[in-house]
């Protein structure tokens, strides 16, 4: 069953077509990768799906709901979380507080109840904290909960951002280059973690340049070039696709 349907999606910036008539489906429970050279439109695609950009044309269907045109907060509330190519942690907060921010869609109490320290507000804060700690435990850094988030290593900060996205309890997780800046060991561990996330019931759409990682964990791969989809298939078929080889290696080397 397709949990996400991208239909004829397009987005231009001035005269540049960043995404041009792209269509594909994301099957529930799968890990699907979007790959392509720099400037292929991968991050623009993620920004369209997550509501940080609005499409010029086409539609994005999450389950039975059209989400193209909705803002990022509303899309997150529906159950689509994301990480970013460049880590975005909140300064002045510890690791746990950063992850607790990912629980915003579950917050029910308002300003008045917060000021009055009402009992249900205290219960809600307790529940948010417990869920955030569970997310940190899941990614393997619960012992760092009270450390300053910006004092952690780069790889640990990646895990904090991933835990924050998981704290949202998403049905779809968009991962924008989760292995960027990681060494070989950290990249291998990230691959194992992404598979564990999928096994937990979260559907994953990933943009990544590390082809070893992508070929190992992906069920299907979409290839973009200059904003257009040039291939969509299983990893083995993508490796043998002549057009994909030309895009990555150039005509002469291919």
Image (tube, grey):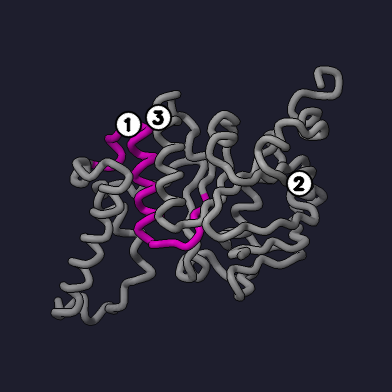
In the picture, measured across the screen, residue 155 lies left or right of residue 34, that is left
- Main secondary structure type of the part rendered in magenta: helix
In the picture, measured across the screen, residue 34 lies left or right of residue 249, that is left
The 10 Å Cα crowd at callout 2, few under 14, some 14 to 19, many 20 or more, is many
Secondary element under disc 3, as helix, strand or loop, is helix
Residue 165: x %, y % from top left: 41, 54
Magenta stretch in the rendered image = 148-174
Label 1 or label 3, whichever comes before in sequence order: 1
Q: In the rendering, which numbered label is found on residue 227? A: 2
The 10 Å Cα crowd at callout 1, few under 14, some 14 to 19, many 20 or more, is few
Secondary element under disc 1, as helix, strand or loop, is loop
Query: Relative to 156, is 6 above or below?
Result: below
Name the residue located 76 percent from the left edge and 58 percent from the top edge.
10
Residue contact between numbered discs 2 and 1, judged by CB atoms under 8 Å: no
Distance between mark 1 and mark 3 Cα atoms: 12 Å
Name the residue located 18 percent from the left edge and 66 percent from the top edge.
126
Residue 180: x %, y % from top left: 50, 33
Query: Relative to 250, is 143 above or below?
Result: below
Residue contact between numbered discs 1 and 3, judged by CB atoms under 8 Å: no
Q: Image quadrant for the C terminus? A: top right
Q: Image quadrant for the N terminus? A: bottom right
Q: Nearer the viewer, residue 239 or 36?
A: 239
Q: In the rendering, which numbered label is found on residue 186? A: 3
Label 2 or label 1, whichever comes before in sequence order: 1
Residue 137: x %, y % from top left: 26, 47
Residue behind mark 1: 153
Distance between mark 2 and mark 1 Cα atoms: 34 Å
Q: In the rendering, which numbered label is found on residue 189? A: none
């Amino acid at each position: 069953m397709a949990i996400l349907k991208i239909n004829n999606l397009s987005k231009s910036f001035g005269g540049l077509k960043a995404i041009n008539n792209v269509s594909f489906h994301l099957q529930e429970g799968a890990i699907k990768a979007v790959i392509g050279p720099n400037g292929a439109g991968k991050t623009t695609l993620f920004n369209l799906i997550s509501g940080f950009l609005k499409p010029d044309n086409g539609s994005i269907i999450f389950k039975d709901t059209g989400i193209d045109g909705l803002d990022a907060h509303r899309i997150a509330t529906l159950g689509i979380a994301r990480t970013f190519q460049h880590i975005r942690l909140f300064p002045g907060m510890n690791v746990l507080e950063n992850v607790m921010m990912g629980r915003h869609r579950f917050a029910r109490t308002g300003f008045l109840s917060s000021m009055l320290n009402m009992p249900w507000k205290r219960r809600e804060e307790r529940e948010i904290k417990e869920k955030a700690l569970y997310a940190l435990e899941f990614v393997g850094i619960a012992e760092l909960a009270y450390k300053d988030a910006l004092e952690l290593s780069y790889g640990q900060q990646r895990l904090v951002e991933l835990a924050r996205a998981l704290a949202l309890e998403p049905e779809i997780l968009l991962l924008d280059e989760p292995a960027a800046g990681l060494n070989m060991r950290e990249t291998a561990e990230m691959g194992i973690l992404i598979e564990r996330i999928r096994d937990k019931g979260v559907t994953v759409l990933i943009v990544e340049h590390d082809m070893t990682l992508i070929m190992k964990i992906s069920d299907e791969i979409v290839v973009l070039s200059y904003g257009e989809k040039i291939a969509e298939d299983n990893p083995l078929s993508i490796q043998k696709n002549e057009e994909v080889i030309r895009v990555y290696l150039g005509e002469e080397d291919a």
